[in-house]
Amino acid sequence: MAVNYLKVAQASDLQNRDRFLYRALEILPAILSLGTLLVLIIFSYLKPVWVAYFIIIFDVYWLLLVFFLSLHLIAAYRELKKNIRINWRERCQSLPGWQDIIHLVILPVYNENNEIIETCLNSIINDQYPLDKFIVVLTAEARAGQKQTERCEKIAEQYQTKFGRFLFTVHPDGITGELKGKGANQSWAARLAKAEIIDKENLDYDKIIISVFDIDTVVFSGYFYRLTHAFLTVPNPQRASYQPIPMYHNNLWEAPFFASLSATSNTFWQMMQQIRQEKLATYSSHSMTWKALVDIGFWSTNMVSEDSRIFWHCYCHYNGNYRVEPLYFPVSMDICMDKSNWQTIINLYKQQRRWGWGVENIPYLVFNVIKKWKEMPKKNAFGRIFVQFYGFHSWATNALIIAVIGWLPLIIGGPKFNATVLSGNLPFITRVLITLAMFGLVLSAIISTLLLPKRPSKYGFGKIIQTIIQWIFLPVIIIVFGSIPALESQTRLALGGKWRLGFWVTPKQR
């Protein structure tokens, strides 16, 4: 039987040489990240002078990177604010054919409560886009239990007349070959929508845009007009996904500072990625064309990072002729939060580890580029591969190099190194460079304040001060909830087998 390489989730799905190659690619990210850290630790003892010079060069690089990314953050912020002010309804309705566009919205549910589900549905209604142009699919998980299914059924009854078409479905548990996760649920829902509505009504595939939202997603007013406008105005719209900016505002005022800071940092990273379109991949809640989704055979049902894998699947399927169009328009989501701070810490770490599991896309991308070598645009493919390796390697190592390894030559370099002029100057140089890099923290604090949602009356002005001061903890946050979970994910991918991560659903609390 011929293997569909674009549906491969891990090395064990393959045989012989293909399996060996894919397995080697799964191990490679961990070798690079852990190898970098290990070499620097060893050389801090054996060749502390070499490491000291490397640290100085690295700190200079980090300083330049901070200024470079700060420019992108400012540019993205300006684009975001500009797009929020635009009347996308008027712009969209001035385009011919806009009223022919149908929006299919899939909302996977696990164990979320009524408030979260209804807030998401109400935000779509309040968007003011014509409701008769929506196909909304609420898809629950059978494994969540009968009570959850019944609660979702009642919600479906309340909302089924509010949209042009509404479908409620329950994804069965235990389907052979499926990983328990969101990808399998939304793929089930999309196939059902195709059979029950789209094909039955003979709807035009070319005029359907599908949005897959995490159930805590709240769309800002005008989102679907902005999405429709982008689809009708960008070149080759069928070869693109459409990415909003995730802003974690739903429970921002209630969430602990460390969870809020981690979420806001993620927002800023996504904002900067929108400026660098060549580096952009789909993330969390996003939209794409129905035709592209059908062409690739829907989402893979046997892997974790389905929100980014769908982009790489399309990229390889269309031989590199696929991209993400940045919308510079926000959607709001929940910050990871639980009933206690300690449980929130645990959940936040697990969430970040799951996001770090996106490293599984590196072996997938490299393997399929090799398999489609003749069809792939070489420069573009190499660029994409480099960005992925660089991104996950930086995620896992940069903060640790700056905060920990940078001081090792002084600690384990020995008396001979400590007697040198370089040893005396290294702490001073490092402090100066890191202090200059604090510009990025100040900028982040300013922009995060400008983006704050309206403060609830029960919170005083001191709450705003707290959201500014919390940025001084960023260096710790990016290690505890950045580098460490990223390293763990890469290590688990390298070990394989029982160490592989399954899909973990982030608990939602408001």
Image (spheres, rainbow, N blue to C red):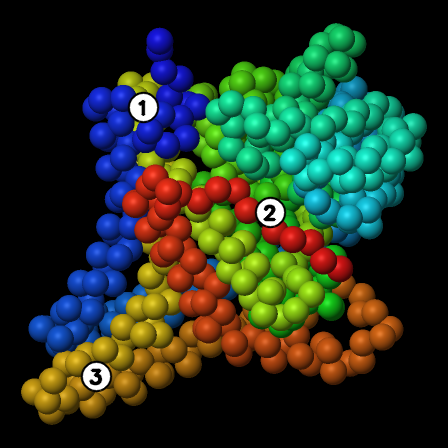
Does residue 416 appear anywhere in the picture? yes
What residue do we see at 57% from left, 37% from top?
181
> Which quadrant of the figure contains the C terminus?
bottom right
Amino acid identity at mark 2: Val
Amino acid identity at mark 1: Leu
In the rendered image, residue 168, in percent from the top left (x then y), is placed at: 78, 27
In the rendered image, residue 73, in percent from the top left (x then y), is placed at: 55, 59
**Left or right of 417 in this view: 218:** right
Q: In the image, is residue 183 above or below residue 489? A: above
Mark 1: secondary structure: loop
Closer to the N terminus: mark 2 or mark 1?
Answer: 1
Amino acid identity at mark 3: Ile
Closer to the N terminus: mark 3 or mark 1?
Answer: 1
Mark 3: secondary structure: helix
Residue 505 - label: 2
Nearer to the camera, 421 or 388:
388
Give neighbour class at mark 3: few <14, some 14-19, many 20+ (Cα, 10 Å): some
> Which quadrant of the figure contains the N terminus?
top left
Residue 411 - label: 3
| Distance CA(mark 3)–CA(mark 1) | 47 Å
Does residue 446 appear anywhere in the picture? no
Nearer to the camera, 53 or 216:
216
In the rendered image, residue 435, in percent from the top left (x then y), is placed at: 42, 81
Mark 2: secondary structure: loop
Query: Disc 1 designates what residue?
Result: 14
What residue do we see at 39% from left, 51% from top?
489
What residue do we see at 32% from left, 31% from top?
11
